[in-house]
């Protein structure tokens, strides 16, 4: 039952939302977002000269009678593009008093349900240092339960490697689409370049950065023996309130860089703390960012 | 110096425990907290890391030493040390304050109690402030007023509250108590100080084993006093209207005294006598006073002496109520010797024709006469007619031999006859509860029926039969009257005495189970009976009643118990208030300086080590080496 991740009340609220993308991506007819591609849509888009092989049903015969030239009417296409939700399952997602992994799964389930309600195809793709087995959810809201089962079944493990992920993603999914990445983006390597790489490949990006409060503002003080959850590396240092403010500033700067990368590529960025309930996160920051409307 | 009543060793142990806790907390504070984090990229650069192998080592020993030193100084400050050149050890003294009755005697300035209080206060002031003192109030009992106390205000207040009691001083008991207290409760025994007049009973004038650390603060030299020792009253056995009064007076002084002793009953003079008392002697004077009324008898000695409290005694006398008997007889001259001979009885003789069942009498005697309506009062029936007898008459016989008396009953107590042949006698039928007193072979001849009213029936005429020559006849009448109105025949004795232990000689054959000792609130007092002596103790002035069958003794214990002798302290006992050596050297308190130094040490530690650790991270090292500026994050090694 979906109640394991999202309760029924929230699902009812989610039904009025739509996954929204900004790019005009090619795809099958039947989507709900407009695109600049012409096709067999309902809305008039433009005229162009008639070329051999064009469908005679689209010729503007009124213009031909006046101008004695063949013009073809083009209609706006509303394509159905693939939506891919990438969920970070690396070990760093397990840290914090409120684990980010559970939070990410709930977010993914919520977005999946929003897409299914609009008959979109949602691909749930777990990743860490590679892409794990994915799940394609499509066919309406009654297909939501298998998606929940899939999300409930995935486990945490591995170390984040965005560069490898980007490489595998563009290989596995050549069709451009909407890529929603739910992660803490705490990769030891730079993750800006791999994200840029995905954008350059034509995917529209929605970066959802999830953090625990301890990730952004550690509450501890004194002598600390720190262990990296993913690599097991350790560092010993002294920490106090002054150092904490420096730490927070560094974290915020890192998040700003992620936002900059997303916006630069016509994508969107949403930063969420696990202390914020999932419902508030969806109807607050996610809606405001335009990822769902 | 004291620290919460801890010795120096215990104080050092406490300092050691706290120091160990501080070291443990120090190491715990310096040890590193292990924490799992999502990434290390935002944390401190390698320059502020410390090596793992040093985590249990004291890394800032001077900081720890400074902290321990500061804490030790603060603890010493709490101990309140003082600086002076004197012996620092404190001692525990026991101050016995005489609160016996004699301490209420006049002195040149107030009373002896005032002098003893002043001496006790002077002794307290002579002691070093660190010494502890236990105040014990001593009269017949030794009562601790305080524990071992160093607070002089508490002791002063306890001294101020001490008042003369009513009993004599039991000095031996007080000294034993003081020695025991020093042995059990004191850390270092000091002196046992006695402040008082030391007037004790003759047998305690010289103590067998006085303590070696005794000091005496004697007050009140030999005081002249003449006082009442005891007053005893009892009704004369020959005449119940007459009180026999015994007064004992004693001269406690060393000079001969001529004093007037006056008695007053209900404010009216009842007698007086001039006494000439030699030193240390006691004289007893006897008075007789005739009265049936109740009232207060006052005995007063007109002596101007140091102790007026024992010059006056007051005793309440109970009323003497006669037993009223109405005799209905056709031959009153036969019964008059039997009835009227009893001094407790007021007998009225009437003819049977004048019988009134509601006549005002305690007892009605019916001589061979049975009225239609029985009397409402207790009644004695002599040869009642069979028809109207209250106790059924079984038969009337001639030549009846009186076989036996029943001496085990109250009515038959002390009755004996031998070979008594009654010319004519009625034999009664006893019912359940009836008490046969005299019996023939056929049945009871004298029988009593308890209840209300009481009835006694005699089957023969005591003055007409052969019984008129027997001694048992008047005794039988007396027994019947005593059984019917026992309160009339109570033997009253009233004594005014001194509080304390009272010894009372019991009559032979007194049943110990019938003895009761009650205070003025009718609550039983504990007592002992050893042989023929009853002993009880009353520590406070009041009235004590001793009930023994038909005998009642009333003790009005209102006279103060003034002992006979003056205690002579042993020659080796120290006397007087000690010299106040060392008191002028005012000890200087060191705790403010120690507290200041301790606080200063903690402040220096915080400035040198506490803040510096904070500064180390604040020095901008984090900002200068922000990890996200590196192309690749390098792990700590």
Image: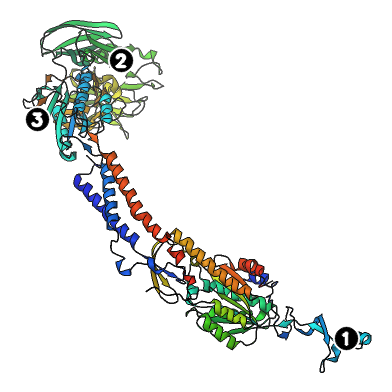
Residue B528 coordinates in the image, percent (x, y)? 19, 32
- How far apart are the alpha carbons under marks 1 and 3? 142 Å
Residue A32 vertical placement versus B28 (above, below): below
Residue appearing at x 34%, y 63% in the figure: B31
- Earlier in the chain: of badge 2 and badge 3, it is 3
Disc 1 crowd, CA 10 A, few/some/many (<14, 14-19, 20+): some
Q: Which residue is mark 1?
A: A60
Q: Residue furthest left?
A: B571
Q: CA distance from mark 2 to mark 3?
A: 52 Å
Q: Residue furthest right?
A: A65
* Viewport quadrant of the C terminus of chain B: bottom left
Residue A12, quarter of picture = bottom right
Residue carrying label 3: B210
Residue B555 locus on image (x, y percent): 24, 21
* Residue at image mark 2: B319
Query: Which chain does the residue under circle 1 lie in?
Result: A
Residue situated in front as seen by the camera: B42 or A159: B42
Frontmost of labels 2 and 1 is 1
- Kindly identify which numbered label has been placed on residue B263: none
- Position of A262 with respect to B311 (left or right) is right
| Residue mark closest to the camera, 1 vs 3 | 1
Against A143, is B494 above or below? Answer: above
Residue beneath the point at 37% across and 24% down: B388
Label 2 crowd bin: few (<14), some (14–19), many (20+), radius 10 Å:
few
Give the number of the mark in front: 2 or 3.
3
Question: From this viewpoint, which residue is outermost toward the bottom?
Answer: A53
Q: In the image, is residue A206 above or below residue B523?
A: below
Check if mark 2's residue and mark 1's residue have beta carbons within 8 Å: no
Tell if the residue under mark 2 belongs to the same chain as the one under mark 1. Answer: no
């Amino acid at each position: 039952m979906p109640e394991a991740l999202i309760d029924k009340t929230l699902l009812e609220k989610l039904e009025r939302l739509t996954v929204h993308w900004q790019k005009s991506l090619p795809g099958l007819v039947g989507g709900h977002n407009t695109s600049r591609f012409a096709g067999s849509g309902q809305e008039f888009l433009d005229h162009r000269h008639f070329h051999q092989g064009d469908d005679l049903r689209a010729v503007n015969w009124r213009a031909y009678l006046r101008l004695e030239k063949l013009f073809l009417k083009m209609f706006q296409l509303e394509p159905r593009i693939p939506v891919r939700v990438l969920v970070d399952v690396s070990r760093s997602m397990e840290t914090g008093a409120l684990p980010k992994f559970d939070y990410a799964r709930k977010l993914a389930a919520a977005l999946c349900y929003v897409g299914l309600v609009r008959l979109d195809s949602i691909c749930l793709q777990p990743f860490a240092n590679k892409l794990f087995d994915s799940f394609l959810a499509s066919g309406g809201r009654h297909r939501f339960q298998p998606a929940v089962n899939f999300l409930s079944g995935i486990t945490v493990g591995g170390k984040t490697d965005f560069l490898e992920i980007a490489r595998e993603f563009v290989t596995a999914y050549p069709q451009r689409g909407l890529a929603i990445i739910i992660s803490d983006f705490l990769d030891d390597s730079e993750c800006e370049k791999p994200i840029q790489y995905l954008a350059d490949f034509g995917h529209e990006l929605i970066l959802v950065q999830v953090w625990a409060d301890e990730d952004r503002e550690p509450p501890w003080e004194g002598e600390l023996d720190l262990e990296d959850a993913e690599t097991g590396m350790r560092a010993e240092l002294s920490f106090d309130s002054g150092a904490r403010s420096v730490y927070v500033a560094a974290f915020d700067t890192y998040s700003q860089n992620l936002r900059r990368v997303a916006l630069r590529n016509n994508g969107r960025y949403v930063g969420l703390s696990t202390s914020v309930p999932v419902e508030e996160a969806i109807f607050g920051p996610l809606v405001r960012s335009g990822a769902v409307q | 110096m004291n620290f919460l009543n801890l010795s120096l060793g215990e104080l050092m142990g406490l300092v050691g425990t706290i120091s160990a806790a501080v070291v443990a907390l120090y190491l715990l504070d310096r040890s590193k907290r292990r924490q799992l984090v999502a990434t290390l990229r935002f944390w401190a650069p390698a320059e502020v890391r410390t090596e793992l192998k040093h985590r249990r080592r004291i890394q800032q020993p001077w900081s720890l030493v400074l902290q321990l030193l500061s804490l030790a100084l603060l603890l010493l400050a709490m101990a309140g040390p003082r600086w002076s050149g004197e012996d620092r050890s404190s001692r525990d003294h026991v101050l016995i304050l005489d609160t016996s009755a004699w301490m209420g005697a006049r002195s040149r300035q107030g009373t002896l109690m005032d002098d003893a209080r002043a001496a006790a206060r002077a002794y307290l002031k002579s002691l070093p402030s660190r010494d502890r003192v236990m105040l014990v109030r001593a009269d017949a009992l030794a009562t601790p007023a305080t524990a071992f106390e160093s607070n002089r205000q508490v002791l002063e207040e306890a001294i101020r509250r001490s008042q003369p009691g009513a009993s004599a001083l039991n000095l031996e008991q007080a000294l034993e108590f003081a020695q025991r207290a020093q042995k059990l409760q004191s850390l270092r025994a000091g002196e046992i100080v006695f402040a008082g007049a030391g007037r004790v009973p003759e047998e305690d004038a010289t103590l067998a084993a006085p303590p070696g650390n005794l000091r005496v603060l004697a007050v009140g030299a030999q005081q002249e006093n003449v006082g009442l020792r005891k007053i005893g009253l009892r009704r004369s056995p020959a005449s119940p209207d007459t009180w026999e009064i015994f007064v004992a007076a004693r001269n406690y002084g060393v000079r001969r005294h001529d004093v007037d002793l006056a008695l007053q009953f209900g404010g009216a003079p009842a007698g007086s006598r001039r006494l000439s008392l030699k030193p240390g002697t006691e004289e007893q004077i006897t008075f007789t006073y005739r009265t049936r009324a109740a009232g207060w008898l006052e005995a007063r000695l007109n002596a101007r002496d140091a102790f007026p409290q024992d010059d006056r005694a007051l005793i309440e006398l109970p009323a003497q109520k006669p037993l009223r008997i109405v005799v209905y007889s056709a031959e009153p001259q036969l019964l008059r010797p039997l009835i009227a001979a009893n001094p407790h009885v007021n007998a009225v003789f009437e003819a049977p024709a004048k019988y009134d069942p509601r006549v005002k009498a305690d007892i009605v005697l019916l001589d061979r006469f049975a009225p239609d309506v029985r009397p409402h009062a207790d009644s004695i029936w002599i040869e009642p007619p069979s028809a109207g007898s209250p106790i059924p008459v079984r038969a009337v016989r001639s030549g009846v031999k009186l076989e036996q008396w029943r001496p085990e009953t109250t009515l038959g107590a002390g009755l004996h006859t031998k070979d008594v042949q009654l010319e004519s006698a009625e034999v009664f039928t006893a019912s359940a509860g009836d008490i046969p007193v005299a019996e023939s072979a056929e049945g009871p001849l004298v029988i009593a029926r308890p209840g209300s009213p009481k009835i006694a029936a005699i089957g023969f005429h005591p003055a007409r039969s052969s019984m008129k020559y027997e001694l048992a006849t008047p005794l039988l009448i007396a027994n019947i009257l005593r059984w019917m109105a026992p309160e009339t025949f109570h033997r009253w004795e009233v004594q005014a005495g001194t509080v304390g232990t009272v010894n009372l000689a019991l009559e032979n054959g007194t049943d110990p189970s019938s003895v009761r000792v009650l205070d003025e609130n009718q609550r039983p007092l504990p007592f002992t009976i050893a042989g023929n002596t009853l002993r009880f103790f009353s520590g406070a002035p009041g009235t004590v009643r001793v009930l023994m069958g038909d005998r009642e003794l009333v003790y009005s214990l209102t006279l103060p118990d003034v002992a006979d002798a003056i205690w002579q302290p042993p020659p080796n006992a120290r006397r007087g208030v000690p010299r106040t050596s060392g008191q002028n050297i005012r000890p200087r308190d060191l705790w403010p300086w120690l507290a200041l130094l301790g606080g200063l040490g903690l402040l220096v530690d915080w400035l040198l080590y506490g803040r510096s650790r904070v500064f180390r991270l604040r020095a901008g090292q984090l900002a200068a080496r922000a990890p996200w500026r590196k192309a690749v994050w390098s792990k700590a090694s």
